[in-house]
Amino acid sequence: MTGSPSTSAEAARKRVADMLREIRRDAGLQVKDVAGRTGWYASKVSRLQSGTTPPSDDDIRAWCRACEAEDQAADVIAASRTAENAYVEWRRLQRTGMRRLQESYVPLFERTRTFRVYSSNVIPGLLQTGPYVAALLSSISEFRGTRNDIEEAVAARLERSRVIREGNHRFSLLVEEAALRHRVGDVDTMAGQLDHLLTVMSYPRVSFGVIPFSSDRRMWVIETFSVYDEEQAQVELLTAQVNVTAPTEVRQYLKAFGEYAKLAVYGAEARALVTAAADALEPA
C-alpha cells in the first residue's frame, strides 16, 4: 500500500503548481515579474508554484493574464478543482448537514457497475438499516458538531442504497468480524441490522464475506475503503474523505481488496459468524 491515502491529493495539487510554473517559464518571466504584474508579493508567487498554497480561481486567472496565457486558465482551473476534491475534510462535506452528502453519492452509485467495499469497523452503508444509520450518523454528528438533520440524512442514505436491489450492478462486500461485533445503537438496532445482513446475503448480485478473527493474516487491518469499478477509490479517514483516481493507487486498493477476499469466508460460514454475533448480543 502507499504510505498515505492522501498521496493522490498531494500529486493533484503538485500538478496544478507545476502547470503554473510551466506557464510562467513559457512566458519567459521570473517570479518577481509575475509578482509585479499581479500586484502580489513574490512570496505568494513562490507559494503558488510550489503547491504550498492552493490557488483560487481568481489567482489562476490573474497568473495566466500576467503570463499572457489566458487561454490556459480554464484547464488549470479544472485541474485545481480536481485537486481540491481529492482530499476533502468532513467538516466541509457536512457543513450544511448530512443529507446533502448522502445525496451527492447518487450519480456515482448509478453509473458504477461493480462495487467493492472493505469495512473494518462498521456495516457498509449499502447494507445498513434505518435504525443503524440513525444511530451511526447521530454519533458522527455529535462528534463533529454538524447540523442535526439526521432524519433527512437517514432517508437519503436508504434511498441511495436502492442500487443494491435495482439496476445492473454487482457488489463485493467484505467486513472484518469486528464490524459484526461493534455495537452501533442499542441491542434491538444491532439485532435488526444483523438479521438484515442475513437477508442481503441471499441477493444474487451480492457477494458478502466476513474476515474472521481467527484468520491467518496476510494483510493487516486498514481504513475502510470503496472502489467503484476500476476508476476510483474512496478512503474514509477520521477527518477527511480521500478520493483516489491515480491508476497506480487505484490498483493498490484493488490488490488489497483481493488479499482481503482471500482471507474472508462466504456462504454458510459467513452466515454462521453473523448468527453468532447476533446470539452474543446482550443488553448493555
Image: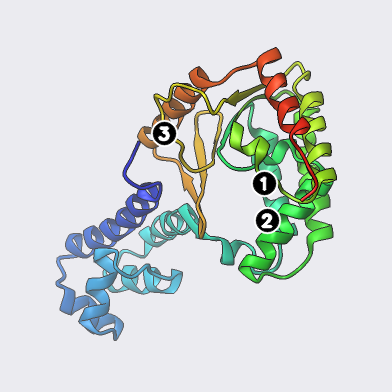
* Residue 62, x across and y down, in percent: 36, 74
Q: Nearer the viewer, residue 55 or 281?
A: 281
Q: Residue at x 68, y 51 (%)?
A: 104
Q: Is residue 212 left or right of residue 282?
A: left
- Which quadrant of the view contains residue 124? top right
Cα separation between marks 1 and 3: 28 Å
- Residue type, mark 1 in image: Tyr
Q: In the picture provided, is 159 more to the left or to the right than 87?
A: right
Return the mark for residue 26.
Answer: none
* Percent x, y of residue 59: 38, 73
Is label 2 in contact with label 1 (beta carbons under 8 Å)?
A: yes
Amino acid under disc 2? Leu
The residue carrying pointer 2 sits among few (fewer than 14), some (14 to 19) or many (20 or more) residues within 10 Å by Cα, namely some
Q: Nearer the viewer, mark 2 or mark 3?
A: 3
Q: CA distance from mark 2 to mark 1?
A: 7 Å
Few, some or many residues within 10 Å of mark 3 (<14, 14–19, 20+)? few
Residue linked to disc 1: 105
Disc 1: CA contacts within 10 A as few (<14), some (14-19) or many (>=20): few
Q: In the picture shown, does residue 234 fall above or below 241?
A: above
Q: Earlier in the sequence, mark 2 or mark 3?
A: 2
Q: Residue 233, percent across and down?
A: 50, 39
Q: Which mark is residue 101?
A: 2
Disc 2 to disc 3, how far (Cα)?
30 Å
Asked whether 139 or 160 is in front, the reply is 139
Dot 3 falls on a residue whose secondary structure is loop
Please name the residue shown 77% across and 31% down the image.
Answer: 279
Identity, as a three-letter code, of the amino acid under mark 3: Trp
Which residue shows up at 26% across the image and 72% down it? 47
Q: Is residue 222 above or below residue 34?
A: above
Q: List the residue tagged with mark 3.
A: 220
Q: Is residue 73 visible?
A: yes
